[in-house]
Amino acid sequence: MQWVIPLRQTNVHPADGGTRAYASGTVTAKTSTGAPKRYLIAPGDITAVVAQRFGISVEDLIWLNANLEVFGDQQYLYEGTTLNLDPNSL
């Protein structure tokens, strides 16, 4: 008998709602199902708006990116940083 490890179960399922002010970066990779996997931060991107763009909470975004760094009162993200959006990539 062979053991099979099931995929991790999560209720975090990002979907790209499209670019908008303060979340205008680029999805640089997708999962095999077409869901966004990685996101490249653009100048002026803000944590809350990026999370909103992908239909997830700020808490989920932080969970997916444990070493996420922000600056300023609005929690601006550092341009050029790549975010993980895929819970199966943790």
Image (cartoon, grey):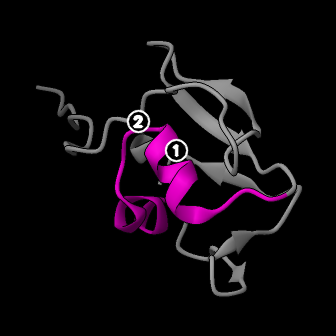
Find numbered disc 1 in the image and state the secondary structure of the residue it sits on.
loop
* Residue at (81% x, 68% y) in the render: 78
Which picture quadrant has residue 65? Answer: bottom right
Magenta segment main secondary structure: helix
> How many discs appear?
2
Q: Nearer the viewer, residue 48 or 83?
A: 48
Which picture quadrant has residue 71? Answer: bottom right
Question: Contact, CB < 8 Å: mark 2 with mark 1?
Answer: yes
What residue did someone put label 2 on?
Answer: 14
82 over 27 or under it: above or below: below
* Residue at (36% x, 68% y) in the render: 59
Q: CA distance from mark 2 to mark 1?
A: 7 Å
Residue 39 in percent (x, y) is at 69, 41
The residue lying furthest to the top in this view is 33
Q: Amino acid at mark 2?
A: Pro
Horizontal side of 33 relative to 67 (left or right) equals left
49 over 34 or under it: above or below: below
Image quarter of the N terminus: top left
Asked if the magenta segment contains residue 19, the reply would be no
* Residue at (32% x, 35% y) in the render: 13
Q: Amino acid at mark 1?
A: Leu
Asked if the magenta segment contains residue 49, the reply would be yes
Find numbered disc 2 in the image and state the secondary structure of the residue it sits on.
loop
Q: Nearer the viewer, residue 38 or 44?
A: 44
What residue did someone put label 1 on?
Answer: 85
The magenta stretch spans which residues?
44-64
Which label number is shown at residue 75? none
Residue 73 in percent (x, y) is at 64, 87
Judge the density around disc 1: few (<14), some (14-19), many (≥20) Cα neighbours within 10 Å. many
